[in-house]
Amino acid sequence: MPLKLYRRGEIWHYRGTVAGRRLRGTTETSDKGRAQRIAAEAEARAWQRRLDGPGSTLTFADGALSYRQSGKSTRFLNKVEDHWKNTLIADIKGTDVLKAAIKVYPTAGPSTRNRQFVVPTQAIINHCAGLDLCPYLKVKRFKVQTKIKEPATLEWCEAFAANASPHLGALCLFMFGTGARIGEAVALVWGDVDLTRRTAKIRQTKVGDERIAHLPPRLVAAIANIPSNRNPQDQVFRYVDRESVRQVWDGAIKRAKIKKLSPHSCRHGFATTMLHNKIDVKTVAKLGGWKDVATLVRTYAHAMGDPTVTDVVFGTNLAQDAKDEASTA
């Protein structure tokens, strides 16, 4: 039975049963001719779905909606959805994704294109594949050159904090002391901080999880000295987003006369300092919110870059050697 049009106010709607499915919807137009075409397209899609399977009419917008409703991370989805819109998922190939990433992020580097476009596009399509709505999509990602990331040290962070406002200095120490990403740090609210128990709940945006971070005494003191009414919903460090931090970050560095490092270097400093102090990799990954140990090792392989550590192969006590060298210096 073909779809029938009817009006609600000025807008035409359609309803009826096509290919065994009950269909109802709005054409979002007051033009009857256009409404008839829209209803005919809806009817054609219903028959295509019946004859060729649900994947034949599955749009990216439909897949993205299902992905969001499943509780998955929505980070970076807006630009991805704006690009693909109602493109049929069946028509999206791996090369299309790479071309689209360049178009949406023309000035970005390969890692940004991978993280902010390729990965979320692939995640939505493969979510639908897991529901047997379409085939899985494989995408050969942009090649990223691994660079050694320079970490902040405790001395650097202390110098920075001494030349920054109380909330900016505390933010720096918080990232260094907990391994928090800058986005996670600026999102911290007073309701997630317990200075008595020395804990903070960090909402890990990148991995879609939460973790409870321990606050060392130095960090408790820095946070306690932030002027605030401490309303549970207020942001602890008073910055709206990472961009607002960058606007004042370099000023503190200039005043402190220290090397220019990014806020993310504090997270690197957390990992490097822990590894240098012989904390095992699994513990560092867990406490710093890295999803897996392999990522941590790959990123921070330089942390134990001293070539003399190979002396331990022959039973040399590195700690004792260090003491001996200090005593003879």
Image (cartoon, rainbow, N blue to C red):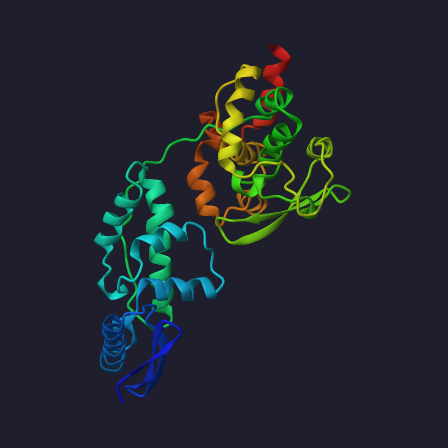
- 231 relative to 328, above or below: below
**Residue 120, x across and y down, in percent:** 37, 54
**Residue 32, x across and y down, in percent:** 26, 74
Can residue 314 be seen here? The reply is no
Tell me if 112 is positioned left or right of 209 in this view.
left
Can residue 267 be seen here? The reply is yes
**Residue 308, x across and y down, in percent:** 47, 25
Along the line of sight, the residue nearer the viewer: 184 or 15: 15
Tell me if 221 is positioned left or right of 169 in this view.
right
Q: Which quadrant of the figure contains the C terminus?
A: top right
Residue farthest to the front?
10
Q: Quadrant of residue 51?
A: bottom left
Along the line of sight, the residue nearer the viewer: 247 or 297: 247
Give the residue at x 31% y 42%: 105
**Residue 137, x across and y down, in percent:** 28, 61
Along the line of sight, the residue nearer the viewer: 215 or 286: 215
- 182 relative to 138, above or below: above
